[in-house]
Amino acid sequence: MKILAVSGWSGAGKTTLIAALIPLLKARGLSVSTVKHAHHGVTLDKPGKDSFVHAEAGAREVILTTQDGFAVFSRQPAPLEALLARLTPVDLVLVEGFKAEALPRLSVYREALGKPAPWPDEHLLAVAADTPLPNCPVAVLPLDKPGDIADFLIPALGLNKTGNG
């Protein structure tokens, strides 16, 4: 599985870009999964539901399954490597966030946010931006053209348009 970190400041458009890239990459014959890192606390289950009660009682993990799919709830933090190992193999895993991981990275950058540029970063493949970045040391891709970004990523990550699996 190839892994690409998609990172950037809050409000830059990471999730929007990932949501646009997934169907484009799938249309090119690639299978895609995602892992999202949140810096704030989120309730993973609903208080009062049976699965929540199981966890409150001390279950290490709870799997909730329905005819539409399943979810694994755990109250233990896990490193990215352990999370990736749980995934069914796919051609590409897009991980949102994980700025500190040594992974090929696509940074989403909006100059108007007034935040520092995402370089230098030895793992940076490209920057998806809404304005030209003349001092950027890597490819600058138009944030509003996810098809161009997908076309760049496929060869940059060593994927092919008919899938790798």
Image (cartoon, rainbow, N blue to C red):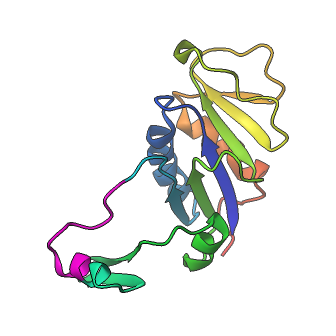
Of 163 and 125, the residue lying toward us: 125
Q: Position of residue 3 (x, y in %)?
A: 68, 59
Q: Is residue 58 visible?
A: yes
- Residue 141 lies in quadrant: top right
Horizontally, residue 29 falls left or right of residue 59, namely right
Asked if residue 140 is positioned above or below residue 122 in the image, the reply reads above
**Residue at x 58%, y 54% (from the top left corner):** 95
- Check residue 59 for magenta coloring: no
Please, which residue is most extreme toward the front here?
Answer: 57
What stretch of residues is rendered in magenta? 42-53
User: Image quarter for residue 71?
Assistant: bottom left
- Seen at 67% across and 41% down, the residue is 106
Please name whichever residue, 35 or 68, is drawn nearer the observer in this view of the structure.
35
Q: Is residue 163 visible?
A: no
Tell me what residue is drawn at x 65 percent, y 36 percent: 107
As displayed, is residue 39 above or below residue 53?
above
Residue 126 point in image, percent of width and height = 73, 35
- Classified by dominant secondary structure, the portion drawn in magenta counts as loop
Asked which quadrant contains residue 85, the reply is: bottom right
Q: Residue 83 location, x and y as percent?
A: 57, 71
Which quadrant holds the N terminus?
A: bottom right
Q: Quadrant of the C terminus?
A: bottom right
Q: Nearer the viewer, residue 11 or 156?
A: 11
In the rendered image, the vertical position of residue 77 relative to residue 40, given as above or below:
below
The percent position of residue 133, horizontal first and vertical second, equals 71, 16
Number of numbered callouts drawn: 0
What residue lies at 61% left-to-right and 41% top-to-bottom?
7
